[in-house]
Amino acid sequence: QVQLQESGPGLVKPSETLSLTCAVSGFSISSGFYWGWLRQPPGKGLEWIGNIYHIGSTYYNPSLKSRATVSVDTSGNQFSLSLSSVTAADTALYYCARRDGYTWGYFDYWGQGTLVTVSS
Amino acid sequence: QSVLTQPPSASGTPGQRVTISCSGSNSNIGRNSVNWYQLLPGTAPKFLIYTNNQRPSGVPDRFSGSKSGTSASLAISGLQSEDEADYYCEAWDDSLNGPVFGGGTKLTVL
């Protein structure tokens, strides 16, 4: 069974960089698929942040592209998100997920999510 | 403001059939397939429907999806208390070059 688990600080100061890691078990990242980050601000809907293909190609939401970086660590079977220059608007429940396919695909496995609050 | 439009809430009594709509445009639903997810607080989101109307293994056949033009819908028949959750639609958007979501529909089982 594929399982994903997010980890990282729950509190980040404004203007600093948010860093999260997603540990994958039950499947080897190097075997394929896209691996992505999404978020849900309080009281709002889901927003896609970006994906990384197992060989390292990255794809980002244009609204976040200049601040977001997704990277993969195949030896550790995990992938990460860095979001720079955060503001209160970046406060959200952050999810990592596996995407089966690109334009025609879907997010088939998700982590439980981790709440990140941006506050001084 | 979400790219796809869903009603914020829906409700039904046990055993009823409810439908949740998802409206988009030619750059997303009009050209690409729709997926549906179920979100419950404190748990990993569950993948319910893919490619408009396909159910992943393990999803009861009480859940069904359909698509017509730039709109899609999720139907839940034989409503159960455990179906009380938030439901989100998703489709690839050719303009964004990425997946977009609806704002979510909170389903209440009365």
Image (spheres, helix red, strand yellow):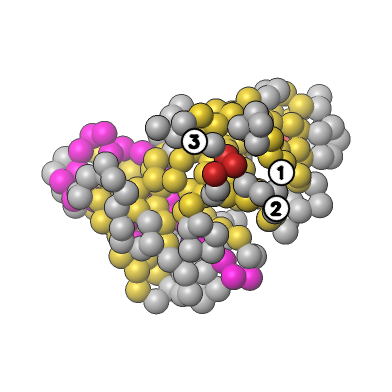
The secondary structure type at the circle numbered 3 is loop
Q: State which chain disc 2 sits on.
A: A
The amino acid beneath tag 3 is Phe
Magenta stretch holds residue B74? yes
Q: Name the residue under label 2.
A: A58
The amino acid beneath tag 1 is Val
Percent across and percent down for residue A103 are: 54, 64
- Residue B104 can be seen, yes or no: no
Q: Name the residue under label 3.
A: A27
- Of the two numbered discs 1 and 3 in the rendering, the one whose residue sits closer to the viewer: 3
Q: Residue A70 carries which label?
A: 1
- Of the two numbered discs 3 and 2 in the rendering, the one whose residue sits closer to the viewer: 3
Which mark sits nearer the N-terminus, 3 or 2?
3
> What residue is drawn where x is 46% and y is 40%?
A109
> What residue is drawn where x is 65% and y is 28%?
A76
**C-beta proximity under 8 Å, tags 2 and 1:** yes
Q: B54 or A72: which is nearer to us?
A: A72
Q: In this view, does B105 lie to the left or right of B101?
A: left
> What residue is drawn where x is 20% and y is 50%?
B61
Residue range (magenta): B73-95
The amino acid beneath tag 2 is Thr
Percent across and percent down for residue A54 are: 62, 47
